[in-house]
Image (tube, helix red, strand yellow):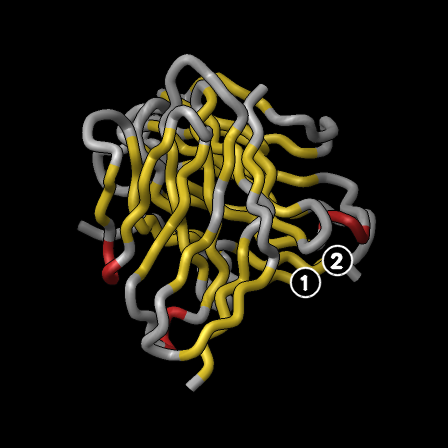
Amino acid sequence: AQSVTQLDSQVPVFEEAPVELRCNYSSSVSVYLFWYVQYPNQGLQLLLKYLSGSTLVKGINGFEAEFNKSQTSFHLRKPSVHISDTAEYFCAVKEADKLIFGTGTRLQVFP
Amino acid sequence: KAGVTQTPRYLIKTRGQQVTLSCSPISGHRSVSWYQQTPGQGLQFLFEYFSETQRNKGNFPGRFSGRQFSNSRSEMNVSTLELGDSALYLCASSLSGEGTQYFGPGTRLTVL
């Protein structure tokens, strides 16, 4: 079975600084990978996805992620964060018809 | 297009009662999946329905059940509620099970 590891439970960062949220998955022949964001008292919003093709994936709100097969990683990056990016971020891998999620990373942006 | 909707948004029940949650998928989506989110266990897959058939089930007791109607709307039911069932229940829809899943706002269930 697939698994997803998000090494950082919390990432504090100042506004306008760059940020990287790390995600590693267990190896498989082929993977579909996703990043979702969850704001307080809300559901999950899709940020970006990797299904195939280019390893650099661009998403909404200025986020991007790079699929690295050799390191089984799918790290999320943003060059300059905003206060409104404060939220919980989840990395997920698709297995059959279900998503397997990491434990989440709480991004806290300070002014 | 309207997104995934879930009703009710908040629910308070007592132990031993049962509860039914509802999910309406994005128009045209035929697959509906349910997830439970708790602080301790994180996001866990409950089950997935496609064309009124349950195709996949997570590791939850039989008290958790679901169904899907011909219009793709889905309900999940939890019987004999326990305190540990308190959670945010999220519904997600996709065109098919293999597609990208889009989530609703969730139903916050509190069991007292």
Evaluate whether residue A10 shows in this view. Answer: yes
* Image x and y of residue B91, in percent: 46, 43
Q: Which residue is mark 1?
A: B12
Residue at 57% over, 29% down? A3
Residue topped by disc 2:
B111
Q: Nearer the viewer, residue A70 or A43?
A: A70
Direction from residue A40 to residue B65 in the image, left or right: right
Between B22 and A59, which is closer to the camera in this rendering? A59
Q: Chain of mark 1?
A: B
Q: Chain of mark 2?
A: B
Q: B85 or A63: which is nearer to us?
A: A63
Asked whether the beta carbons under mark 2 and mark 1 sit within 8 Å of each other, the answer is yes
> If you read the primary sequence from the N terminus, does the residue marked by circle 2 or circle 1 appear first?
1
Residue A8, horizontal then vertical, whole percent = 58, 54
Q: Which of these two is toward me, B45 or A85?
A: A85
Amino acid at circle 2: Val
2 and 1 marks on the same chain? yes
**Image: B61 above or below A45:** above
**Which residue occupies 47% across, 73% down?**
A13
